[in-house]
Image (spheres, rainbow, N blue to C red):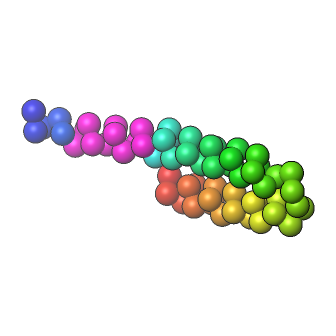
Amino acid sequence: MTLYRPFYDSVSKKFTDRIILPTILLFYIIANYQIFGKFSILLKEKTAETVFLLTELSAFIL
């Protein structure tokens, strides 16, 4: 059983990195747009900067 452990850890990490993190990022983008998107252009720009930085960070992690 311990022989296969690195394989399962690898699959688990890929699942977390490829599915869970982008899903959290997507929900963050949607929530920010719904909360701040209708009030101010400045807030939209800040949200866009935040989204850009988060996507760059997630691309770096992957």
Query: Picture coordinates of residue 49 (x, y %)?
Result: 74, 64
Does 17 appear in magenta? no
Quadrant hosting residue 13: top left
Does 10 appear in magenta? yes
Q: Residue at x 12, y 37 (%)?
A: 3
Q: Residue furthest right?
A: 41
Residue 24 left/right relative to 31: left
The answer, for residue 13, to whether it is visible in the render is: yes
Q: Residue at x 57, y 55 (%)?
A: 59
Query: Picture coordinates of residue 44 (x, y %)?
Result: 82, 59
The answer, for residue 52, to whether it is visible in the render is: no
Part of the protein shown in magenta: 6-16
Of residues 14 and 48, the one drawn nearer to the viewer in this rendering: 48
Quadrant hosting residue 10: top left
Of residues 30 and 58, the one drawn nearer to the viewer in this rendering: 30
Of residues 52 and 36, the one drawn nearer to the viewer in this rendering: 36
Q: Residue furthest left?
A: 1
Q: Residue at x 78, y 55 (%)?
A: 36
